[in-house]
Structures are given as C-alpha cells and as structure tokens.
Amino acid sequence: MNIAFFDFDHTISTKDSFLDFVAFSKGKTSLYLSLCILAPFLIIYKARLYSGQKIKELVLSYHFKGMNQDEFDQLCEQYGRERINVIINNKASDRIKWHQENNHRIVVVSASIDKLLRYWCEQNCLELIGSRLAIEEGKLSGKLLGKNCN
C-alpha cells in the first residue's frame, strides 16, 4: 500500500491554521493584540532561544485557557466547516485527489492542534496526526499534551 504524507500549514493550506483559527474564533483584533503582548517572546523564539512549543502554549493560554472543552470542540468544528476550505492550496488539493483516486492512504501531519483540522480531515477521508491539547477537569489548560507535533 502506498502512503502519502502531507504537512498542513503552508502545504495543504496557504496560511498557518492555528493563527487563522485564533483570528476566526477570537477576532483579528484579539489575535494582533496577543501578538503585540507576546512580541518579546516571539523575538526570543526567532533567535532560537525559546521553543515553538512554548510560544504555542503562550498563545493557547492567552486565548483559550479555562475554556470548556465542548465549547472549544464546537469552535473547531465550525472552523472546519466554514473556514478551512477558504485557505486550501489548489495544487495540494489536486494532489490529494490524485492520491485518493489511486487508493493511497493519505496522512495529514501538522503542528497545529489536531482538533482544528479533524472535521476537515474526516470530511475528506484523510488521516490526521497533530498536536494535542491538555485538558484538566473538562477545560483547556493552555498546554499541549506531550510534544508539539512538528
């Protein structure tokens, strides 16, 4: 059996899906404000002195820490239904269709939160490997469960 692996962000999609999701769910103003507040950490990250996982967890905490898991799951499904198709790269979409027509197993691999992409992947019969959220007492902790999938 042939297997095709695709990265999601900037391969299947034209954008970073995590930041796009924040803008979708919280608004662009909230996203930009958080990036300004977190700018010192972003600079340290760009200098390779701070990990991508820590940056992602800072943004997660800023926007979603304490959010009910079910509410977050609904936002993710809404994002999958309403937004992801807008950011899909047509060439990548064509390549995925080619693999499907040839009965290949297709796996999407992403550092983005798996829940953001799950609905879209299920609708397109694609397997998914992504970063997972840590949940504490039914609420988002702002942390990843294990390592960032990158």
Image (cartoon, rainbow, N blue to C red):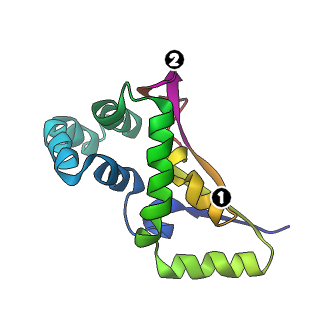
Judging by the rendered image, the residue that carries numbered circle 2 is 137
- Which residue shows up at 28% across the image and 40% down it? 45
Q: Say whether residue 81 is visible.
A: yes
Residue 98 rendering spot, x and y as whole percentages: 69, 82
Quarter of the rendering occupied by the N terminus: bottom right
Q: Is residue 138 left or right of residue 127?
A: left
Q: Is residue 54 above or below residue 36?
A: above
> Splitting the image into 4 quarters, where does residue 104 fall?
bottom right
Using the numbered discs, state the Cα–Cα distance from disc 2 to disc 1 in whole angstroms.
27 Å
Q: Nearer the viewer, residue 96 or 85?
A: 85
**Numbered disc 2: secondary structure:** loop
- Which residue is drawn at the image coordinates 58% and 52% (left, top)? 118
**Which of the numbered marks, if any, corresponds to residue 122?**
1
Amino acid found under the numbered disc labelled 1: Glu
Verify CB contact (< 8 Å) between mark 2 and mark 1. no
**Residue 111 image offset from top left, x and y in percent:** 49, 48
Q: Name which residue type carries label 2.
A: Glu
Q: Which residues are magenta?
A: 131-139
The chief SS type of the magenta part is: strand
Q: Is residue 67 above or below residue 10?
A: above
Alpha-carbon neighbours of circle 1 within 10 Å: few (<14), some, or many (≥20)?
few
